Amino acid sequence: MKIKLELSKIIESALQSANIETDEVVISDATKPEFGDYQFNGVMKLAKELKKNPREIASEVVTHIDTTGAIGKVEVAGPGFINIFLSDEWLAKQSNALIDDDRVGVGYVDTPKRVVVDYSGPNMAKQMHVGHLRSSIIGDTLANLLEFLGDDVIRQNHIGDWGTQFGMLIAYLEEKNTDGNTQELKDLEQFYKDAKVRFDESEEFANKSREYVVKIQSGDEYCLALWNSFIDASLGHCEDIYKKLNVNLTRDDVRAESFYNDQLPQVIETLKEKNISTTSNGAECVFLEGDENPIIVQKSDGGYLYATTDLAALNFRDRELNADRICYVVDSRQAQHFKQVFTIAKKAGMVKESVKLEHIGFGTMMDKSGKPFKTRDGGTVKLFDLLDEAVVRAKDTIKERDVHSDEELESVAKAIGIGAVKYADLSISRESNYIFNWDKMLSFEGNTSLYMQYAYARIQSILRKYDGEIDGDIIIGDLIEHRLALMILKFEDTLNRASVDATPHTITSYLYDLVSLFMKFYELNPILKDDIPEEIKLSRLQLSKLTAKVIQKGLEILGIEVVEKI
């Protein structure tokens, strides 16, 4: 439910009744329970404009605030803050309306947008490694979130499949006499290294590789067939990872560099026609104000660069996909590149001014020593190995609890292990680097996926133990129930904020607060004790059930599974 919007309207009406005009009413969360549920802090600004005492203005506004509906009471605090306390009856009514609502009170956006989310972006010459993890996880969460809120989301997996190394790779495919679907390509990393050795040691092989690059780009059927077999095998590796990670990317979402190859000459032509690019030392360059170095869009030998392909992709997404918002979920170190490309695209008219272009940057995964995450020998950690280890460690964490059959243990360990890796990533502000710590991410305490999954499983256990149909109404009986019901109703505001800011950690922070409140509620308010009146028992069961629905929906958006028992 959009509670802040509801309260803004009430405060706006009170201001009008007090003959006070304002451009905008902003409602903030209260910092402490004793300060109420929300606060209106805009009186200070109004006092400056009206040249009046802020506390006097606040006292006047309070007399006009309607306390017959959502608001139970209001108080003037400090120099002129207005503390807002929601009504228990209103909270109960709103909560009861969510009991049978699959969307737990979350509405759709008023004006749906078509949003392109570009994420994951593996290189076809190598297996996916930890460097692809954050893009895949953050991008998929953002896409899930926007879809849930009602936007028309187009997932795009911009893979690198078009460059000089591919001549080398298909020449090696030919030499090994493989169709690209055999054991030869099981380890792409090793295949690439072996091809590079041949390239470096044999001039004949190197020359053939260079010839094959030209042939691929000119459409030679034989070379394209070899190239396609390699790409097909490479994508198969990626699909295995996406399935393991529960990431919603398919072959239909792949939009490779090669797709834009025919459009690159037109990009250069457009830049020339609009006098945006100039020729410098034989290369076509764009000089942007404030940037010392030019952006090269075509080399002196006629070759194109990443910037050229990105401009073609932006133009395609604007003209063909009709995007209103384009999000690139890419490492923060690429910030300058995207700033430049976005500027050129708008300047050249390749993207309409109304289209919102965003670089959703993120930091680096670090090891315990604070260095980029590597294997013991300094190599890049492959995602398959990392995820397999996560499942093994999860199994070790839960098997001593002895509540699962062997078959259940495998399934639950996968949900917990993969969830732990994803949640640990998503719970950190995406722009920050973060320390990868197995013990922390697989803990039953703290802001972890396992803590959320455990709370959900505990609620399911409570619901199973109740002997009868759970069909009563929620009644708010004390402060902890008030706070828990309010937190449930904040779910929609939380998701909307996360979608605008592209911040998954907004959702994880909310889930942690929700589960922490539930644990306090569970501790202070017994649910199934015999001496509790049936009406109160049913109310607490419904509140628990509603909490579980929000936990499940929140984790679902993050791409994490719940489990029925732990």
Image: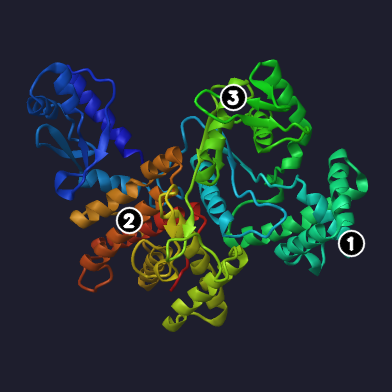
How far apart, in angstroms, are the residues tagged by discs 1 and 2?
Answer: 59 Å
- Residue 376 visible at all: yes
The residue where tag 1 is placed is: 175
Comparing labels 2 and 3, the label whose residue is closer to the camera: 3
Camera-nearest residue between 549 and 152: 152
The quarter holding residue 301 reads top right
Q: Position of residue 542 (x, y in %)?
A: 33, 58
Taking the spot 62% from the left edge, 25% from the top edge, the residue there is: 286
The residue where tag 2 is placed is: 514
N-terminal-most mark, 3 or 1: 1
Camera-nearest residue between 31 and 38: 31
Element marked by disc 2: helix
Q: Position of residue 451 (x, y in %)?
A: 38, 66
**Quarter in which the N terminus is drawn:** top left
- Residue 324 visible at all: no
Q: Position of residue 138 (x, y in %)?
A: 51, 50
Element marked by disc 3: loop
Residue reaching furthest front? 281
Comparing labels 1 and 2, the label whose residue is closer to the camera: 1
Taking the spot 57% from the left edge, 56% from the top edge, the residue there is: 131
Taking the spot 56% from the left edge, 75% from the top edge, the residue there is: 410
N-terminal-most mark, 1 or 2: 1
**Quarter in which the C terminus is drawn:** bottom left
Q: Is residue 27 left or right of residue 357?
A: left
Circles 2 and 3: CB distance less than 8 Å?
Answer: no
The kind of residue tagged 3 is Phe
The residue where tag 3 is placed is: 287
The quarter holding residue 379 reads bottom right
